[in-house]
Image (spheres, rainbow, N blue to C red):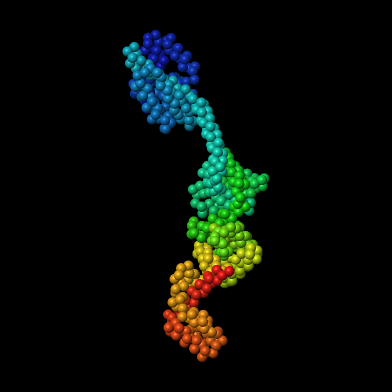
Amino acid sequence: MTERSGRRSLRDIASIGGDAAPLAEMYRALVEEIPAILYINGPEEHSPTIFVSPQTSDILGLPPEGWYDNTWSTHVHPDDRDAVQENYVRALRHDATDADDDEYRFIRPDGEVIWLHDTIRVIRDDNGDPALVQGIMFDITARKRNEELLAAQAQTMERIAAIGQRFTELLLAGGDLQAILDALAAIAGAPVAFDDAARQLVGFATAGVDSNTLLATWEVHSRRVHAESAAAGCAWAPVRLRDEEWGRLHLLTENDPDEIDLLALDRAAAAIGVWLLSNRDRAALADRARAEFIADLWQGRRWSARDAVARSRTLGGDLDSPVLLGIAVELVPDGSSAPAGQEPGAERTLTTVLGQLRGLAAESRTTCMAAVVGSVCLAIIGLASDARARSEAGRLAARLRASAQEELSRSISVGVSRPGSADALRRALTEAVDAAAHGARALRVGGVYHSADLGLRHLLTRLGDGPELGRFVEDELGPLLEHDATGKVPLLPTLRAYLDSGGQKATAARTLHLERRSLYYRLERIEALLEADLDDPSTRLRAQVALQSLDVLRQRNAAYVP
C-alpha cells in the first residue's frame, strides 16, 4: 500500500503557492464543512501524504495520525486491499486529467464494515508533469446497503417466480410425485417426506442424505404430534384434495426454514394435490410405494435386512417377525392368446386378489406386506414360530385360492416359499414366484405350490418347454408305457409303488394289496421290458426321475384339454 506519511499543515501546503494565510483559511473552511475526507499526496507511487482532513475520525474511526502512519491501509478489507493499491497506481500512471474512481470496503476499529467512494485526480504543473495527487473519500455505506437490499429483494422475487414456475412446468411436463419431491429437496437443500392420512410414508427425497439414515430419522419423527405449523426439525404443509387433508408434506431440516423454503413447501404441496387429482390411481398411491419396495427386495436392490424392516414400518406392515415367508399369486391362463397376467382385466383381477389376501391376513392376525408387482401379486408374511410356518402359510394360501375361485371364477396358482428371516427376503420372494410359476405357467393348473416340494420337479418343469424331457421319458419308460397302453394289467403303478417304498418289496406289496408272488412276477416283467436290473440303485434313480418327468408332462397336457 502506498505510504501516506510526512504530516504537513494547511499553511505548509498553501506556502507552496506564496501567500499562505488566506489560502490556508479557505482550505480549512472548506474541508471542515463537507462530509468527506480530503487528502493530498505527492505525485509518485510512494510519495508521502501531504495533508488529510480531520473527518477521518468520524468516517473511518481513526484520527488523522492513523492516516499519516499508514494504519488506515491495514483496515481496508482484505478482499479489496490488492485492488485498491492497483487502482491507485494505475491512476498515477494515467496521462489524462480525468478523475479515477474506486469503491471498496473499510473495516473500522469497532468492527463495522463501511463502503468508501474514493476519487483520485492528478494535479499537473505548467509542463504537464504530475505535481500533486488530490483525493476525496465519501462514505457510501447507506447507498451500498440499499443496493444490496434491493438486489436481495430482486433475487428473492426471482426465486419466488422461479419456484412457482418450476412446479407448474413439472406438472405440465407430466412429472410425477417423485419429481415434485426431488425438486423441493433441491430447492430447500434438505430431505423431504410425504405421508398419507394413515401416516404411512408414501414417498421421499434424500437431498444427499443416505436413505437408510432418512428412514431411521423418519421412524422417530413420524411418531411425534405435530403442532399446527411445525415441529422441531420439521416444517410441513397439508396436501388437500377437495378440502380434505389427504396427507402431509414434510421438510426435514435441522435449521429453521427461511421464507423461500416455506414458500417452496407450500407450492410443492399444492402441486402434489393437483397431481393427485389428475392421477387416476391416486387411491393406490401407497400401494405403488409398497410395490416398489417389494420389487426392490425381490431384485436384491437397496435394502439391508435392518433397513427393510424399518421401511416396512413406514408402509404399514411391520416385518419385524421371527419367521418370514414369501407368497406369490399368478393367474392361470384362461385360454386366451395373451399371456397370463396380461390379458384384459388381469390387473383388476390381481388387485382384487391383493385385497382378498390382505383381508385374510388381517382376519388371521398375520403380519402381511403385499402389493401387485407386474403380473404377480407378491407378499411377505410374518409368523411367530417356525414350527407351524408351512401349515399356517399353506392354510392362508388355500383360503386365498378358494376365495379367488368363488368371487372371481378365476383359477390362480399360489406359491409359498420356505420360512426364513429378514436376511433371506430375496430368496423367499424368488422361491414363491418360482413356485407360483410352476403351477400357472408350467402345469397350467391352479393350486397351492410349496417351494420345498418342487425339488427335482421344478427343474424338470423348466425342461418341459422343449422336446428333451419327452425323449428322456420315452428312452427310460417307452416299452413299459406301450405295454400299459395295450395290456390288461398296467405295470406302471407297480414300478411307482416299488420305488416309493425305497426298493422294499414287502412294503410295496402291502401298498398294492398284492401277494408277494404276484409282486415278484410283475417286477420281473418290468425288468424284462426295460432291460434293466431294479436292484441296481442307478437304475432305480433313473426310473424315479423318469416317473416325475412323466407326471410333469401329463399335468401340462391336461391343462390344454378343454
Residue 407 image-quadrant placement? bottom right
Residue 538 is at least partly visible in this image: yes
Question: Residue farthest to the front?
Answer: 486
| Lateral position of residue 504 relative to residue 228, left or right | left
Image vertical order of residue 460 relative to residue 150, above or below: below
Q: Nearer the viewer, residue 300 or 482?
A: 482
Q: Residue at x 61, y 46 (%)?
A: 278
Check the picture and name the quadrant holding the C terminus: bottom right
242 and 219: which one is in front?
Answer: 242
- Which residue appears at 48% of the width and 69% of the height? 464
| Residue 50 in picture, x, y percent from top left | 38, 19
Residue sticking out furthest to the right: 243
Q: Residue at x 44, y 85 (%)?
A: 528
Quadrant where the image shows the N terminus: top left
The answer to whether residue 289 is above or below residue 165 is below
The picture places residue 426, in percent across and down from the top left corner, at: 50, 62
Label count reads 0
Q: Is residue 302 above or below residue 253?
A: below
Instruction: Please provide percent x and percent y for residue 93.
Output: 34, 22
Residue 312 visible? The answer is: no
Residue 561 against residue 117 in the figure, above or below: below
Is 52 in front, or is 409? 409
Which of the pair 320/374 is nearer the observer?
A: 374
| Residue 191 rendering spot, x and y as whole percentages | 53, 47
